[in-house]
Amino acid sequence: MRKLILAAASIAALTFAGPASAQAPIVIKFSHVVATDTPKGQAAERFKELAEKATKGRVKVEVYPNSQLYKDKEELEALQLGSVQMLAPSLSKFGPLGVKEFEVFDLPFLFKDTAAFTAVTQGAIGQDLFKKLEPKGIKGLAFWDNGFHIMSANKPLHKVADFKGLKMRIQSSKVLDMQMRALGASPQAMAFSEVYQALQTGVVDGTENTWSNLYTQKMHEVQKYATISDHGYIGYAVIVNKPFWDGLPADLRTTLAGCMKDATKIANDNARKDNEDALEAVRKSGRTQIITLTPQEKAAWKRALVKVHKEAEERIPRELIQEIYKEIGFKSE
């Protein structure tokens, strides 16, 4: 905490140093935990390019990928303190912050495709969720797509029984914890930056992620099998420190919001191809055997995991779950 407060004070001093620095650009530090050549990484770079061009140098965006500044367990606190101004954490990260409603996105087999996910994030439900962040000093700007989860391990994962006793890394989400326990696995929450070494050393046996994250973090080098399960969806919320945002000149807020909208469209349009390319790269590497579930196997996974929806009502308002069911036409079978 002391380190973050000192960092925040330093940034404040640089940003509001007085008349001598009046012509200096406003700096937005944009921190994230994945590689640059991922859907989120590319979107952050695109936002930087658009924002600096559109503001004609009045704003400078500094992008820090791969947990260069903060791990995913630390970055939200850093944002609230003003040590960074912008993040794009996965939607799983807001539960520990006290906004448990975001864990609805972790419900397994909730979204049948990307269109179902965007119907929720780009509509009234998504905006209502963003409003719940504001009392925490956070403003939501956009939702970014990544793609569907796969499961990886050093043993083939075909059946639910194959998970029994496996130590599976998860993000810090109680719903993902429920998910792994429903499969008979032992969930292990840990920072994204620590996963490769944990897989390499056997601290965990497997993980879930998208193809782009698996490949760019080289997890395929230490996982013998990957199952195309499409059991969950990874999306991100682009968020900004609210006092910082509210303190910007109105014209800059409008310009930056427009740049974010443009970057979001580009990012979401490219996410599917990025994951398809990563899947092909993993396949060509020969390091990981790729498993495609039969319809019967996938149906068995879904039967085991849809039970988590009811269990999760202890954390997520039932009304929100039902609202999303209605919006996307969810069917449990």
Image: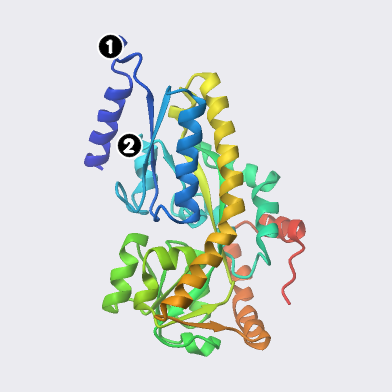
Residue type beneath disc 2: Ser
Label ID, residue 110: none
Whether tag 2 and tag 1 are in contact, CB under 8 A, the answer is: no
Marks 2 and 1: which is nearer the front? 1
Q: Give the quadrant of residue 103.
A: bottom right
Query: How many C-alpha atoms fall within 10 Å of the one at disc 2: few (<14), some, or many (≥20)?
Result: many
> Which of 233/270 is in front?
270
Q: How many marks?
A: 2
Rendering coords of residue 130 (x, y %) = 58, 42
> Which of 209/287 is in front?
287
**Residue projecting furthest to the front:** 284
The Cα atoms of the two marked residues, 2 and 1, are separated by 22 Å
Measuring 47% from the left and 47% from the top, which residue is drawn there? 88
Label ID, residue 83: 2
Rendering coords of residue 176 (x, y %) = 50, 67
Measuring 51% from the left and 71% from the top, which residue is drawn there? 279
> Which of 142/311 is in front?
142
286 is higher (above) or lower (below) than 53 = below
Residue type beneath disc 1: Ala
Answer with left or right where residue 40 lies relative to residue 12. right
Tell me, yes or no, if residue 85 can be seen here. Answer: yes
Rendering coords of residue 150 (x, y %) = 52, 73
Rendering coords of residue 277 (x, y %) = 52, 65
Measuring 40% from the left and 49% from the top, which residue is drawn there? 32
Choose the circle earlier in sequence order: 2 or 1: 1
7 is higher (above) or lower (below) than 331 = above
Tell me, yes or no, if residue 94 can be seen here. Answer: no
Answer with left or right where residue 12 lies relative to residue 138. left
Label ID, residue 20: 1
Q: How is the image coloured?
A: rainbow
Measuring 43% from the left and 22% from the top, which residue is drawn there? 58
- Name the secondary structure under disc 2: loop
